Image (spheres, grey):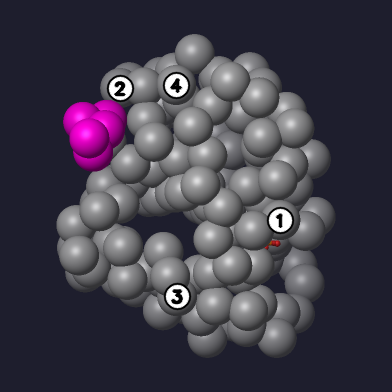
Amino acid sequence: MESAKPCIALIAHDLKKDDMADFARQRQTALSKFRIVATGTTGGRVQEAAPGLDVTRLKSGPLGGDQQIGAMIATGEVSMLVFFIDPLSALPHDVDVKALTRLATVYDIPMALNRATAEHLIDFQ
Ligand SMILES: O=C(CO)COP(=O)(O)O
């Protein structure tokens, strides 16, 4: 049977992955109220950091994972986005990152692009 829990997407760029792992560990109880989808590498880090969480790993971001999550936002499957972006590095898939944050805006879902905002969002669930 399909879980009734809402679905949150977790993504972090490489230099933000330690931060995401720490966030998942610290906020494990709050995150356990969600089904989690994550891009491939981020999802692996989250599973290691907080093994009790319900995490589905999609493709890695540069290989289409951001686009998969964008599609899930468009179909209403993902209702919140936590995306720790790296604003100081050039990324080959920058257009995918932009498309994802655009869709989160189009569909008006809560979106945190840094840890401080993510903590507020999760703590107010
Ligand atoms: O690049 C990403 C998001 O744009 C993240 O992908 P990974 O979690 O697979 O590293």
Q: Which residue is mark 4?
A: 32
Closer to the chain start, of discs 4 and 1, is 4
Q: Amino acid at mark 4?
A: Ser
In the rendered structure, the answer to whether residue 51 lies left or right of residue 34 reads: right
Quadrant containing the N terminus in the rendered view: top left
| Precedes in sequence: disc 2 or disc 3 | 3
* Label 2 within 8 A of ligand 1 by Cβ: no
Kindly indicate whether the residue at mark 2 contacts the one at mark 1 (C-beta within 8 angstroms). no
Q: Residues within 10 Å of mark 1 (few under 14, many from 20)?
A: some
Indicate the secondary structure of the residue bearing disc 1. Answer: helix
Q: CA distance from mark 1 to mark 2?
A: 26 Å
- Tags 2 and 4 touching, CB below 8 Å: no
Residue at 75% from the left image edge and 32% from the top image edge: 48
The residue pinned by badge 1 equals: 41
The stretch of residues the image draws in magenta is: 1-5
The answer to which of marks 4 and 3 sits earlier in the sequence is 4
Tell me: residue 3, above or below residue 39.
above
Q: Which residue is mark 3?
A: 67
Q: Earlier in the sequence, mark 3 or mark 1?
A: 1
Name the disc covering residue 125, or none: 2
Using the image, determine if residue 82 lies above or below residue 60: above
Position in image of residue 41 (x %, y %): 71, 56
Is mark 4 in CB contact (under 8 Å) with mark 1? no
Does the beta carbon at disc 1 come under 8 Å from ligand 1?
A: yes
Q: Is residue 73 visible?
A: yes
Residue 69: x and y in percent read 41, 64
Q: Which residue type carries mark 2?
A: Gln
Asked whether residue 103 is drawn in magenta, I would say no
**Mark 3, other Cα within 10 Å: few <14 / some 14–19 / many ≥20:** many
Please state if 125 lies on the left or on the right of 53 as rendered.
Answer: left
Element type at mark 3: helix
Viewer-side label of 2, 4: 4
